[in-house]
Amino acid sequence: MNGNRRTGLALAVPLAILLAVLFAGGRGAERVGAAPNASYEELETFTNVLAIIQKNYVEEVDTKRLVEGAINGMLASLDPHSAYLTPELYKELQVETKGAFGGLGIEITNRNGMLTVVAPIEDTPAARAGIKPQDIILKIDGEFTKDMSLVEAVKKMRGPKNTKVRLTIKRENPAQLLDVTLNREVIKIQSVKSHTLPGGYGYLRITQFQEHTDDDVEKALHQLEKDTGGMRGLVLDLRNNPGGLLTQAVKISDEFLDSGLIVYTDGRLENQKQKYFAHKANTWGDFPMVVLVNGGSASASEIVAGALQDHKRAMVLGNQTFGKGSVQTILPLDENSALRLTTARYYTPNGRSIQAKGIEPDVVMEEGKQVAKGGDASGTMLRESNLPRHLHQPNDAKDQEANPEVSPDSEASEIVPPDVKEGEVGHDPQLDKALELLKNGQVQKTTIAQRTE
């Protein structure tokens, strides 16, 4: 990484707000300066509207409520990922990347004004209750969610441990209307899971990129090396990983690369133009790799998959990833509140922008069926390009024409089929295919030198 100091903290965050999983603190960041004088000329209409509402509205309205509503509306008009963080949300944001938080365990987004599930987080109340990708949350405790902001929805679904929340779910395929009552829990996410595979191969799954994920990956690799007597190959599973911290994506990529660019960001300001490089020391490079991805692999996951693919360090298998290729920076407004603002796009080492496009696997495969590269195995999976006001590809104002929004009536395509047990040989077709490729020597051998201790 170059030496420029950034204002706020850069995040390669997922497409949506996670229930009780916002992303990172702005601790130690500089405050944002005042707007240019020319901007104030455009504020006259706003102040006039504010005064008219305060004087003439049928009921007295709190000024703070009006201003916060205006800020939320302003940020919502930009892109799906910029947001105003109230003191309550800002406080939670500063602690929740440590891997323990309260809530239900659902990743959500807003599609065509409908609160839509992207994926439940495994081993959480939502997953155990059978919440599925593409489910539409019609009501929260009896209150309709139509046009409800993500921030408001998250706030309603959070709460103390062992308290209940009732969700009314609309499922398109098959058509169902379900009432589900869930108990809120303090959710502890194990971001790294691993086990050995037959024949001396290793399996490593990263569920999210949190603080210390790199340390957990390093420990898991050492254990796999010990258990296999020297790994012959590794399957890195990033399916349904919504992302997390940009710094962790860089560190995980650096585990498997000994040199070269990992990712770079490009924004309007000079300090938003960052480059992150790999280092030779402690590189795990003496075995071939396959990376598993799908439509739920977003942001930080795409950085890792793209870097390993561009450097030909690993073969990428699965189906097209989500396409979240923008960086959000936390910009404190005062001691209690902040903005989460999209400030840059990120690019793979070969200069590919992932935004609204995603990573195309080397071997395209979904639900046990392999298709030709360039074929469509994605169905109608919700992706970045389907979100209203998504950031376009650079210099491509017609991005939406190539990526039409998915209609709420479209046939849903689940991220993982119900009969698939991820990470289990014989029950996970993508894993079985990855292991077959490794055993048959079809994965390109790395040229990285033996790992140095």
Image (cartoon, rainbow, N blue to C red):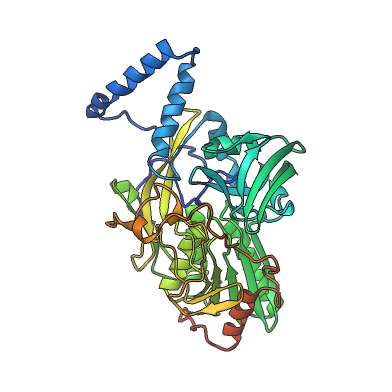
**Looking at the picture, how far across and down is residue 15, in whole percent?**
49, 51
User: Is residue 94 at least partly visible in the picture?
Assistant: no
Residue furthest toward the right?
Answer: 162
Q: Nearer the viewer, residue 162 or 373?
A: 373
Q: Nearer the viewer, residue 16 or 11?
A: 16
Image vertical order of residue 412 relative to residue 16, above or below: below
Residue furthest toward the top?
Answer: 55
Locate residue 182: give its quadrant.
Answer: top right
Locate residue 393: give its quadrant.
Answer: bottom left
Please tell me how many numbered marks the rendered image carries.
0
Q: Quadrant of the C terminus?
A: bottom right
User: Is residue 126 at least partly visible in the picture?
Assistant: yes
**Looking at the picture, how far across and down is residue 123, in whole percent?**
71, 54
Image vertical order of residue 145 relative to residue 64, above or below: below
Q: Nearer the viewer, residue 372 or 312?
A: 372
Residue in view at x 39 percent, y 64 percent: 348
**Looking at the picture, how far across and down is residue 84, in whole percent?**
46, 34
**Looking at the picture, how far across and down is residue 203, in whole percent?**
64, 72
Q: Nearer the viewer, residue 373 or 235?
A: 373
Residue furthest toward the bottom?
Answer: 440
Q: Quadrant of the N terminus?
A: bottom left
